[in-house]
């Protein structure tokens, strides 16, 4: 069983939110809203996609690379924690 199944509900909720944001962009374009309004909607959608990406990547690191909470080597645990933090910061 894939580890994403464990958080399936949470991940699907994020995807549904993103779908709603995409629909809002579509409605804004159809209504010929100003570019500033459309760009704000796109920016919020991009943030939501980055959040989803960060969530899946962090789970991947913890389940397939190294889980800092269960790593006996303190250097590897520290490196994994730093990698997760950098990814989250980068994807904000």
Image (cartoon, helix red, strand yellow):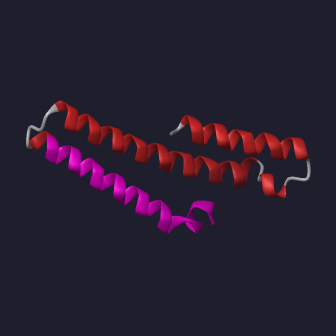
Task: Name which residue lies at 20% across and 38% down.
Answer: 37
Is 89 colored magenta in this rendering? no
Q: Which residues are magenta?
A: 1-28
Q: Position of residue 77 (x, y in %)?
A: 83, 47
Count of number-bearing discs: 0
Question: Which secondary structure is most common in the magenta stretch?
Answer: helix
* Quadrant occupied by the N terminus: bottom right
Residue at the image point whose x is 26% and y is 34% from the top: 39
Asked if 82 appears above or below 63 in the picture, the reply is above
Note whether 75 is above or below 58 in the view shown.
above
Q: Is residue 60 left or right of residue 21?
A: right
Residue 37 vs 17, above or below: the answer is: above
Q: Check the image and name the residue furthest to the top.
A: 35
Q: Position of residue 41 (x, y in %)?
A: 27, 42
Left or right side of 37 for 84: right
The quarter holding residue 82 reads top right
Q: Is residue 32 left or right of residue 12?
A: left
Q: Residue at x 51, y 46 (%)?
A: 53
**Residue 33 locus on image (x, y percent):** 12, 38
The image quarter in which residue 85 lies: top right
**Viewer-proximal residue among 75 and 59:** 75
Q: Residue pushed farthest left?
A: 31
* Residue 43 occupies quadrant: top left
């Amino acid at each position: 069983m894939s580890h994403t199944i464990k958080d399936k509900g949470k991940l699907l909720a994020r995807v549904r939110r993103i779908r709603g944001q995409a629909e809002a962009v579509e409605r804004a374009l159809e209504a010929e809203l100003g570019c500033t309004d459309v760009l704000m909607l796109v920016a919020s959608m991009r943030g939501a996609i980055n959040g989803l990406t960060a969530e899946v990547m962090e789970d991947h690191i913890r389940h397939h690379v190294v889980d800092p909470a269960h790593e006996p080597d303190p250097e590897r645990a520290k490196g994994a924690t730093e990698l997760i933090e950098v990814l989250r910061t980068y994807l904000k």
